Each structure stands twice: as structure tokens, then as C-alpha cells.
Image (cartoon, rainbow, N blue to C red):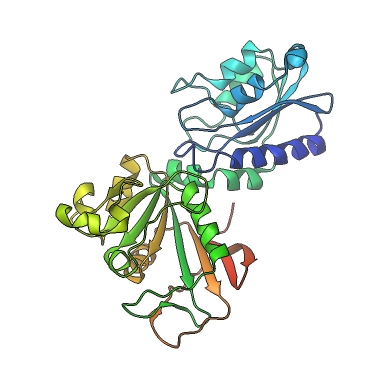
Amino acid sequence: MDKVQAEKYLAYCFYLAEQGSGSVSPNPKVGAVLVYDGRIIGEGYHQQFGKAHAELRALESVKPEDVHLISKATLLVSLEPCNHYGKTGPCTELILKNKIPELVFSNFDPNPLMAGKSIRLLEQAGVKILGPLMEHEGHQVIREYVCNVANQRPYVILKFAQTADYFLGKTNTRTKISSFASDLCVHRWRSEVDAIIIGKNTLEIDNPLLTTRHWAGKNPVRIVLARIARDQRLKWNAFNKDATTYDLDDLGLEDAYSVENLLAKLFDLRLGIVMVEGGAQIFSFFQKSGIWDEARIITNKELKIGEGLAAPSIRGHLMKSITLDKDIIHYIAKNRPY
């Protein structure tokens, strides 16, 4: 398969991989296709943590009348296949067992102990290799996993809504800023992360549910950076039975000031992606620590309130912007995208 043709199929692999958002963390999102003579005969993606990998899904999707083509097909995958026994068997073994003659991949495994091992093994076994290709696009798909491996902590997203004059809201008063369309978007984001973090002020002023009730998907774990007596928890929506909730005592933390300690605890709980939803003091802790990876800022272009809680000033690299109703949403990466 030539490079131009391979990149077209890899772009589809990236699309497939993204379908696993919210279900595979702390594993990486991966998509795969099997192509024979310009036709996709199998496709799949990693759908759930601990379950079948994308390569197996692609093989299982091949129709009975096309099974004989597998040994003549090219396997394209968004990430270097695994070569170890974990919750599933190694994908390299699967490739060799099915006599797949050619592999195209986008990125090497970001784990330095694993990077390139699968490719070398397959090459030595006679499999034709093309890659890495489209590394920037492939890296974007697995950026959360790369952060987990490189930093041994969750990928951190700062999310907030601000007025046109850059306030989070009025002091000690619940202020509705974003549109319903943006709320839907936020609920989708929640379905794609492992945990949401809020502080005591947000709990007491907004009394949020922190669920995905407007979107089909799992509810994330809720982290409240305060000490809430057990006999007082049921008065707060964030402690209802819709999802698991931890406060400082549950996490064994003395206070909310050490972002490093907090993230270490969350990583121990296998929470690979977290979204910080406020309030101002919690945003301040993360900004001062310098430990965050992405910001998603919803700005109501029409609403001005004159005074209140100042919104964080975020510096980074704009990845994209979208408009929803009266809001504009900026996606900002702390570091320049790979």
C-alpha cells in the first residue's frame, strides 16, 4: 500500500478510535481497519477498558465470505499494536496467527519500555511495515494516554464559562452563563472524562449534579475538594447515588492545596482524564501549580455583569473554536500540540 492511500485509511482509523472516548481510559483510544484491494473488509475500535483491542474487533467484523482475504490484506491501526499479555492477549500474536502480510501504523507506543518492540518483532517475522505516518494527528487521538504514561498522572482539562466581560459569575450567587447548547456539549465532555473536580464554594453555591443527564454516557466520578460530614452529604446533589463521589477525607488528603498529591491519588484510582469545573479558587490552585493540559472556555458573547469573580487568564495554544448559539468555545492546549 502506498503512503497516500495509507493516510486516507489512517484518517478513518482516527475517527474510529475517537468512538472509544469515555470508555477506554486509562487505555489509549485505538482504531483499526483491514483493507484488501481498495476495500475495507473489517473495522473496529477499542470499545471498553479491559475488553478486545481494535485489531481483534476489526478481524471479528470480517464477513464469512471475506475471511479468506485476511491473509492478503493490509492492517492499518492508529497506534503500534501491543506485544504483551494483560487483560487481553498481544495483538502481535493475533497478526501473525492470521498471517496478515502488511501493517500500517501512525504512532509508536509512547511507553519508552514498549516503543518499537512490536514493530521490530513483526518485521523480523516478515510482516511488511509502513509507518509511523500522520504522527501529529495520531498523537492528538492518544494525547491523554501520552500524558498518563509520561507524567504518571491524569490528563487535566480546565473547563469554565465566562461572561463577555470575563467574569465567572457574581460573588456568592449562582449565575447562569452558558446556553443550553453549550450545556449539552459540557455533558458530552463529562461522558468522556473519568472524573470531575469542584471546590466547596461551587458545591454550596451551585449545588450541581455533575452528571451526563443531557447526554448518553456514563456519569464520571465526582471529586469535591472539601470535607463534608457524612450526615450532611445527602443535602448536596453531588453526593446523590447517580455516581461515586469522593471528598478530601475519602481521598486521605489533608487539604486541597497540593495539586500534585491530589492527582497522584486520582491516578492511583485509575482515573486517567479529569475535568476541573471550578470554582475560582480551585482554578487558581491548578494554574499556580502549572499542572494542566487543556482548557475549554465557554464565553457568552452577549452577557456582561460588570463585576464579580474574575475568570482565569489562560495562556496556551488555540486548538480550535466553535460557536454554539450565543456562546463561543475555545479549546486551548497548554503546550503546543505535538
Is residue 50 rendered to the left or right of residue 41? left
Q: Residue at x 44, y 61 (%)?
A: 158
Q: Nearer the viewer, residue 66 or 140?
A: 66
Give above or below for 73 relative to 189: above
Position in image of residue 248 (x %, y %): 22, 54
Is residue 75 rendered to the left or right of residue 268? right
Q: Nearer the viewer, residue 14 or 122?
A: 14
Position in image of residue 70 (x %, y %): 73, 16
Quarter occupied by residue 81: top right
Position in image of residue 176 (x %, y %): 45, 73
Position in image of residue 297 (x %, y %): 51, 67
Quadrant that contains the N terminus: top right
Q: Nearer the viewer, residue 182 or 13?
A: 182
Residue 187 seen anywhere in this rendered image of the structure: yes
Q: Residue most toward the bottom?
A: 306
Give above or below for 39 relative to 196: above
Q: Residue at x 83, y 28 (%)?
A: 38
Q: Residue at x 62, y 66 (%)?
A: 324
